[in-house]
Image (spheres, rainbow, N blue to C red):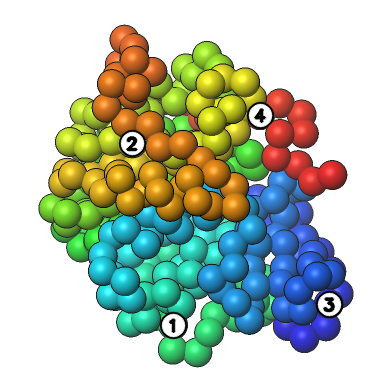
Amino acid sequence: MNESIPVIRSTDRGTARLLPDVDRARAWLLTVDGAPQSYVDLDAPEHLEFEYVRRLAHVVDLVAEPEAPVDAVHLGGGALTLPRYVAATRPGSRQEVAEADAALIALVEEHLPLPEGARIAVHGVDARSWIEQAPEASADLLIADVFGGARVPAQLTSLDYARAAARVLRKDGVYAANLADGAPFGFLRSQLANAAEVFAELALIAEPAVLRGRRFGNVVLLAGQEPLDLARLTRLCAADAFPARVAHGEALTRLMGGARPVRDGDAVASPEPPDGAFSLG
């Protein structure tokens, strides 16, 4: 995409806009119905603007030795920011992306093409359906970043979903999910309870103000069967341009309280964010 002209198109789930970044020649912001979804710099895929995406990228940096290729699954595609990051920082990685909005996939393919040679397969399929049919123990990394508007769909918030996700990961694989909540954290507590039922190791990454309940915001849930390198993750998050806190152990036990896992029949979407929480301007 050479001309910095905004693109507006109706997709399966709303109105998508590609907006040029006036400060970076080939960088674009994707919004859907006014909610920011992705930011991509075609010339520098390692450049990440969104705070939560930077935190997910820290997880990418931890899953294997530097530059070592991984097998990664992405639930939710948007403009494919993280798949591009993985391809740039871990050349040769095999990646599968499940994105339900076929019209959005077409928009991104047309205006924000993937780099030549990137081993990224994008599937126009519902994330839950894809994960339930994916091969067992086939991924080193599973990243879930699926939002319907500004909410995580209910089908991706249950214990049944967590079990399906865990099945796809290898023994030392890592699961990372972008969630959103605010005090009193009823939704986040249920997600911790689901994950604790399935995974041996858990952690959360978020801005301190969010974890203290002072504002609504993104929280990255991190899980796996093997011990996570939380010391290194803490250093990466603390040194970031947007510092974040890593919570684990007793802190998560206290936060979870008496929350119980949620089955499919009782699962709900993440809370509606307050006005202005994620919108532009």
Q: Which residue is mark 4?
A: 273
Q: How far, Cα to Cα, is label 2 from label 4?
A: 23 Å
Looking at the rendered structure, the secondary structure element under dot 2 is strand
- Give residue 19's mark: none
At 72% across and 68% down in the image, what residue appears? 28
Q: Earlier in the sequence, mark 1 or mark 3?
A: 3
Q: Are marks 1 and 3 in contact (CB under 8 Å)?
A: no
At 64% across and 58% down in the image, what residue appears? 49
Residue 65 versus residue 133 in the image, above or below: below
Looking at the rendered structure, the secondary structure element under dot 4 is loop
Q: Which residue is mark 2?
A: 203
Q: Is residue 258 left or right of residue 184?
A: left
Looking at the rendered structure, the secondary structure element under dot 3 is loop
Q: Which residue is mark 3?
A: 4
Disc 4 packing (10 Å; few <14; some 14–19; many ≥20):
some
Type of amino acid at the residue the image marks with label 3: Ser
Q: How far, Cα to Cα, is label 1 from label 3?
A: 24 Å
- Give residue 118's mark: 1
